[in-house]
Every structure is written in C-alpha cells, then in structure tokens.
Image (spheres, helix red, strand yellow):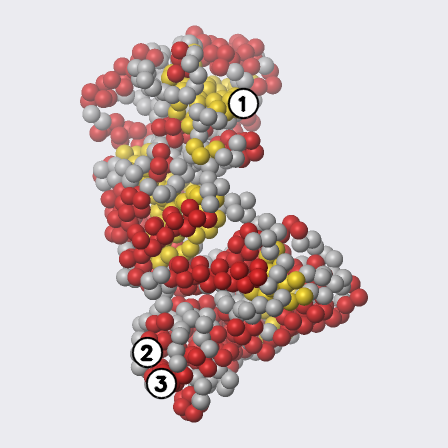
Amino acid sequence: MNLPEFDIDICMSCADAACLTKCQHISIQRDVAHKEILKIARGEDSPVLHECVTCYACEEYCPYGNHPFYLIVERQEMLGISPQPSPLIKRAINIGIPFRGEPDIKEINGPVINMGAFSPLKHLIEGKLFEGLTVISDDERKMFHYFCQLMYLHYGKISIIKERLPNVIANIAKHKPTEVICFHDECYGAYTSFCNAYNIDVPFKPVHLFEFLYNRLTVLKDTIKPVGLRVAYQRPCSSRLSPDKHKFVEKIFKLIGAEPVKRKYADENALCCALTIQGQKKEGSRRRSLEIQNKNIEDMKDSGAEVCVFNCPACYDTLSEKVSQHGIIPVFMSDLCRYAIGEINLENKRFINKYG
Amino acid sequence: MDDIYKALCRIVGNEHCSNRPEELFIYSFDLGTFEPKRPDYVVAPKSAEEIQAIVRLANENSIPVIPLGGGLSLAGLAVPLKGGIIIDLKRMDKIIDVNEKARYALIECGVSQGQLTSYLEQHYPHLTHSEPGAPPAATMAGNIMIHGQGDLAHPYGFTSDMICGLEVVLPHGDILRIGSSAINAGWFSMHPLPDLNVFLGWYGTTGIITKLSIKLFPAKKIRGFGTLVVEDEDLVPEIIYKITHTQLCEDIIAFSRAIPPFASGLHHITVNIGADSEKELEFKQEIIWDDVLGEYIRQDFAGYLGFKRGLERPQVSKTSDYKKGGGFEYVGGIMPVETYPICYKKGREISERHNIPYTVTARVIGAANSMMFAWTYAFNRAEPESIKQAREALHETDGLVLELGGVIWKPGVYGQRLLMERLDPVTKDLMKKIKTLLDPKGIMNPGNWEIF
C-alpha cells in the first residue's frame, strides 16, 4: 500500500460504506459494500475493481476523507485490472510526455494562472476577470511540462501520477508564483487532494478557478448585469476531489443573476460526461456511455435549462454538440462570467458544429 | 526580346507571360527534395484554345512544355527537367456546371479541390466529392493526373476512377474529348465508347487535361469519424477487412508516427461515417464498434477513442514541423492491405537509419482492394545534408515498395526508373508507342516516363 493517508480502521468502523452504496454505476447493498471495500483495502480482488468506471465520486461520498477512489485505482494497478484496454493506456501514458523542448521559465513573483494541458484554450481567460494574472503553460508545444497527470486515475495507472507529478510541481514552482489559479479543477485536485493524500510537497498556493472567478466578480460587481438565464451545471469528475469548492458554482450563479435549474443529476448526484466510459473494455461500454450522456441531457432539458455551464474541457468536447442540438447553449463558466460583465455575446456559442 | 517570348505574350497577354529570373526561380522547384531546374518561360493561359496555341508553338520550335496545377505533388513531377515552358493552369478555374441529378461537376483544369469543396458546400450542400488529403490549393486535374485518392476512396476508389469525361489538348494541338461528351451527349459517363484514356497517370506527357467531369456523391448531413487504437500492427489488416465488409464507411485511414508521442508505436484506425439522422448514425456505429470490433476491445487488443463530428483529413504535412526548416516528402505505395505490418516495420527501420522520426499513413482504396501506404520523411530545407538524408530515405523507400510487391504511387524520376526496370516488356513497348504516336518530338513534360 502506497497511500499514506489511507486508514483501514476507518473503513472497518464505517457504518454505511457510502463510497460504494452511493455509486451511480454499481448497484450494491450496504453489507456487501462494506465487505468489498475491506477486501480492496487488504489487496484482494473485488468485483468493484472491475465494475468501477472511474468517475471519482466516491472520493466525495466518503465522509472521512479516506480516499476510497485512490485506493481503488491503487488496487486496479496492483492487480492489473484497468478498466481501459491496453492500447488506450499506452496512448494515454504517451500523451503526457513533453516532446518540444524545455519550458520557458520566467520568475513571476505574483499570481499566475496555469493552463495545464489546455494551452489552446487561452481565449477562455481573457478580459477584465483575468487582468493582472500571468499565464503559465501558454505554449501548447510545451504544455505537457505543466500537465497535472491526474488523468491516469481513469487508466488504473496511479504510479504514473506519483512518478511525474513532482516534476510538474517543480516546473510551476520555478516561476515563483505567489498563488496558482488552476484553469482546470483536475489540476486543483492534484495539488490539493492528491498531494495531501500522498504527502507530496506543493510549494505554492493553488486556487480553484471558481473561487477566483467569484472573488473577481465581487470586485467587479458594479459591472454585472444579471444574466437572467436558467442554467444547468455539468459537474466534472475531478470536481469530486474538491467538493468544498463546489459551493462556488451556486455563489457565482447568484452573483451574476443566473437561475440554477432543479435537476435530478446535480451536486452529489451529478452524472459525469461519460467520456472515459465509452472506451472501456467491459461489453456495452460505448452504449452505456451514450445512455449516461442522454440521461444527463434529458435531465437538463426537463429542468428547463437554457444554458449548460462547463468547467472541464473534456466534458465540453463530449457534450457540447449534443447539448446545442437540444437548444441549450454550451458555455464555459468563465465565458458565462464574461457575459455577465458585458464582455461577450453568448448567441454565437449556440451552434457549435455545422455537421450537427 | 526573344521571338518565343513575344509569341507567348501574343497568345496569353503580356501580364500572363514571363521570362523574368525571379519568376522563373519560383517555378524551378517544388516543395520536396527534388533538385531545382529553371524553366525558360512561364505562361498562365485562360482557355483550352490558348493552350492549343502554346503547344503548337512549342511543337514548331521543339520546346518542352510542362503543365502545372497546384504544384503540390512533392515528387518533382512539374519541375522542368529540360527547361522549356511551364504552363501554369491556375487561371482556368471555372466551375462550369454542376448536374445535381446525374451528380457530376464539369470543371476547368485549374479548379482547386478546396474551391470545389467550398462551392458545393455553398450551393449544393447535399453533394460532395472525394476530397484528397492534399492542401486546398491542389487542383482536381492534378489529383486525377497522379491517380490521387480522397475521402471517398473506400467506397468509390481512386479519384481518377471518378471521371465522367475529359477534354485534352494533345501534343500536336488538337483538342480531344473522351466519354459521353465526345458525341455531345453531356458529361455524365466515360463509358461505353471504346476506351481512349491514355492521359491519367501520365503527368502530362501525352496531353494536357483542360476540362474534366468529376463524379459527385451524396453528402450526408452528419459526417464524422471514430477511431480505434491497436498496438499490434499484425491486427490492422484483419480489422480493415472486417470494417470494409460492413460497407458502412466513407473512409478508412490507419496511421502511426513517432511524433507526437501518443501515436508512437500505436496504430490509429480512423473510420469516417456519414448519416442523415442520429438513428442512422447510431445504427452504423453499433454495427462497426460493437458488433464487428467489440471483440478486439473486450480482449484488450484495441481501444475505442470515440466519434467526433466533422472531418479530419490526414495531414502528413504536420511532419514538416519535426525538424527546423519545415520540409517533408513522402513515398506512396499502392499496396495490398495485408502488407500493412511489414510496411510499418520497414518504414520505421528506414526512418531510424536516417535519423528521421517515423511517420506512416495508409488509406484504404475500394473494398480493401488496395491501400495507399505513405512513408513520410521530414527535412530541414536550409540544410543540404538534411535534404540529402531525406532523399536517400525516399529512394530507399521507392525500392521497398517494389520489394514488398507494391507499385510506387506518383513516382518521381528515380521511382519511374525503378518501375521501368520491372515493367513487363510488352507493356513498356506499348507505352513507348503511345508516347511516340502522340508526342513524336518528345516535348511533353520530358524527363518523365521516358521509356528506353
């Protein structure tokens, strides 16, 4: 076991095994769940390791912060039970290899925003909200030097994260940032939840994008025109690593005058975009992925959403076309905030693909 | 001022004729590794009649003429090996007619593939053509002249198989029509008259195509591609056979490359699918990914990367960024699909020997009747040694194509010679007779397809 913060005694004494009983992808009774999580903790095989679709949600469901998801991924790797087929694992591992020279390190001595592996999305951090921030990882040829690596949780390859993440942290630290706003909450989860769980030193202060946006909007409050839109939030899997920051979704909506719709699949009960499920080895994964996406979109429609708000670029890539086909405008949170302060129009985001 | 130049100016107008060194320089090379050769004149005619006059002038004076489309073949096919007159065809860019019901477009020879795509999207969105992976500036006539392939190569074959009629200026200046248009019956079919087509694949050595009728096909409302990834190259042929058996796809490409790292040592098989409704799309997806390929995924041999809407065309040009100086060239082979594994392995070996990151791409033609397999080599245009290295790799690969039982696609002069050494004597003799009959003075793009 290489998860310093995991405590089997907590699982032993846990009454409800919420990590598994709340799982939306595995149907399991409390007694069985309790036995299975203990088997997993002891390093034994369990159907849970085979059924897990890697949605991260159990990290949030565990009321003790005992990191059941990291434990599951540890065991998947140890026992060679990756949900993904080998060629996709190899491909994913290769994705994170920097190949275009070393990063350009400049000392900032101020706040920075780290785009991680999403440098091509720099257009999402323009305008007054982001004034005064220095962008790091702004060159897509070199962005994998700043890639938080947490993606490998989907591939049963936690060892890759542990091996590479310290170098990524060192690269960011060389910029001497006073604080690091994380463009993607997966990065934020890496530098907070994951590093805490594995006692990895983080010599800078990570800031969640939504917390940053909320604070900036507060400063720019006088320029906000209430958007008056009914909004649905597509909560990404990585948000489960920082549930304490999820409250900023509602706070931002309130501040900009957006009306969050009442959804079946929201907050703790959110459904992921299912991108990672479509390629899994288990029979029927592609169709299951489609079913989850359709359930999600039907839920948005039924709740009367006009706008679907995204944090994660992968969720956006997966769902935005489908969302727009149903007459809902797909938009990143930062763009919704920019719309609220009159910097952009949302209409041109309504139809995103001529082939759709 | 010389007489030839004056005569050319009279034919095409002063502004469309040049013998100025700076302009001749531009026309002296293509983007590949081929050694530059300077033409004596460059003209840009506007009509078949102007081309007719130019060819007659050239014939009278025994001056070489070299037709030029987009100039993007990379194999030096429009480099004036023996000087002469470059006939730049880009001004002949009229889309003359689109026949919706018979699904063909009649176009002039300078119409680029990007122009045709754009025109159809704007005016006939329910029609499309087999768009090559070449840059938009590549001309349709150039593409058929080299037996190119596009994104409908799997169901319909080579682009040159999609011709419904041709107009050609012959080496002595006559204007020939082939197909139904030869009896003024419209431009809808190449058949059933006796076949006179001795122009495709000849690089302009038998005549200059001035007009062509090209088949159009239904454009599905939804077009996109799904991707399967495998590590074992030996599985690629059988997977391709299974996909093609469904007859549900528009295009099938397999690629592997050292850079970017995600593609290294893996084979991405992209499958283009078109549908008019979500129902049709899901029907096709289910058959392809679940029923036909599902077993490979469940057995851990392959992974499904998902379906993306919109078309991504193979872009070997991205390899030009591998080295400073932005150069790349590839050898294409028309190969049996079953040779994919050995093509890949040998390609990697050649690349590694020449210190070039490997890039291989294959496009399925017809019902897996063959594939175009491309080995791409990057080089630095500013470094002669780098160009030499790439050229050596290319020549080695020309030999590899033949060794593996394939045919070199759009061969440059080096590859043409290799092919000629193996050409059946009777075939070779007939080719020679055809060339001699049509072009007794040997003025048409000389240096290419020279049969000894």
Give the CA distance from mark 3 to mark 1: 75 Å
Number of other residues with Cα within 10 Å of mark 2, as a class: few under 14, some 14 to 19, many 20 or more: some
Rendered location of residue B238, percent (x, y): 25, 48
Q: Which mark is residue B326?
A: none
Residue bearing the label numbered 2: A46
First in sequence, mark 2 or 3: give its number.
Answer: 3
Q: Residue furthest right?
A: A222
Give the residue type that dot 3 points to.
Lys
Contact between labelled residues 1 and 3, with CB atoms less than 8 Å apart: no
As rendered, which of A285 and B277 lies closer to the eye?
B277
Chain at tag 3: A
Number of other residues with Cα within 10 Å of mark 3, as a class: few under 14, some 14 to 19, many 20 or more: some
Rendered location of residue B225, percent (x, y): 42, 48
Residue at the image point whose x is 59% and y is 78% from the top? A244
Residue bearing the label numbered 3: A35
Residue at the image point whose x is 40% and y is 75% from the top? A27
Q: Residue furthest top?
A: B60
Rendered location of residue B254, percent (x, y): 35, 47
Rendered location of residue B244, percent (x, y): 31, 43
- Are the residues under badges 2 and 3 in a single subunit? yes
Give the CA distance from mark 2 to mark 3: 9 Å
Chain at tag 2: A
- Are the residues under badges 3 and 1 in a single subunit? no
Give the residue type that dot 1 points to.
Lys
Where B408 sits versus B355, above or below?
above
Residue bearing the label numbered 1: B94
Q: Secondary structure at mark 2?
A: loop
